Amino acid sequence: MSSIADNLRAVRQRIDHAARACGRAPGEVALLAVSKTFPAQAVREAHGAGQRAFGESYVQEAVDKLAALEDLRAGTEWHFIGPLQSNKARQVAAHFDWVHSVDRLKIAQRLSDLRPPGMADLQLCIQVNIDDQPTKSGVAPAEALGLAREIAALPRVRLRGLMCIPAPQHDPGRQQAVFASLAALMRDLNREGFGLDTLSMGMSDDLEAAVAAGASIVRVGTAIFGARDYSS
């Protein structure tokens, strides 16, 4: 069975090849290792293999994990990528460096209000329901500009870009088309003066299409840590 270090190496090679295939520099694409549901020891192993950015989706699990890995905190980035309820915002504001899943002003305001003094600004991405899935979180593309304007006015947070979780597509061309629409939306926002620089899109099964469409962060879990067990 492949080790986490071997899997990380393989994923980085995929990113490298995908970037070069579309004329991009591999360094333009950051790898976020999605460690949700996996134990602290798995994160420690990935850290030992050079990985420094990790994604979590469940607040209490993440806070417990960060406490167990406090010795690795310096130089490690923690990204919250799951749905966020306002009553959990305090813990996220206090422990994370990034939040990718902001989909309404109330959440952004809570994160802004609760970011502890002295910490760097919390980096935010707006989650966009880019393909209009009825069961998915995220703002409609037409609502992204208004939300961006409201978030940009808040203190202690910084709006960095957009995130999406499109419906699975088996055709690479269709995958890339959906991701390209998020990239086009960010260009539209930047024409309004936002200066966004982050497209968080692409996972284990579609990262190549995301890179080709302009992803700056790909969120990869299964290809690094293995299949998840949600039974507990």
Image (spheres, grey):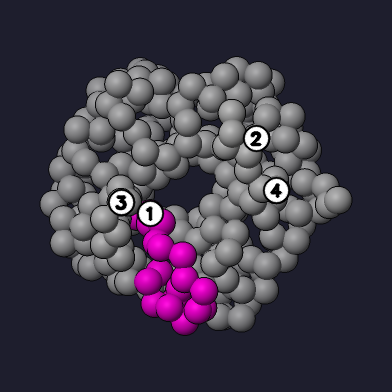
Expressed as whole percent of the image width and height from the top left, the position of residue 182 reads 33, 66
Q: Which amino acid does label 2 sit on?
A: Phe
Magenta part of the protein: which range? 162-179
Q: Name the front one of labels 2 and 3.
A: 3
Q: Measure the alpha-carbon separation of dots 2 and 3.
A: 25 Å
Would you place residue 175 above or below residue 42 in this image?
Answer: below
Disc on the earlier residue, 1 or 3: 3
Q: What residue type is labelled 4?
A: Gly
Task: Find disc 1 in the rendering and name its residue.
Answer: 163
Disc on the earlier residue, 2 or 4: 2
Residue 193 seen by the camera: no
Residue at image location 16% in from the left, 55% down from the top: 143
Q: Measure the alpha-carbon separation of dots 2 and 1.
A: 23 Å
Expressed as whole percent of the image width and height from the top left, the position of residue 117 reads 35, 18
Task: Find disc 3 in the rendering and name its residue.
Answer: 135
Would you place residue 176 above or below residue 144 in this image?
Answer: below
Q: Name the front one of labels 1 and 3.
A: 3
Q: Name the front one of labels 3 and 4.
A: 3
Task: Find disc 4 in the rendering and name its residue.
Answer: 226
Disc on the earlier residue, 2 or 3: 2
Q: Is residue 99 left or right of residue 77?
A: left
Q: Measure the alpha-carbon separation of dots 3 and 4.
A: 26 Å
Which of the 4 quarters of the picture holds residue 205? bottom right
Task: Find disc 2 in the rendering and name its residue.
Answer: 38
Q: Name the front one of labels 2 and 1.
A: 2
Element marked by disc 1: strand
Element marked by disc 4: loop
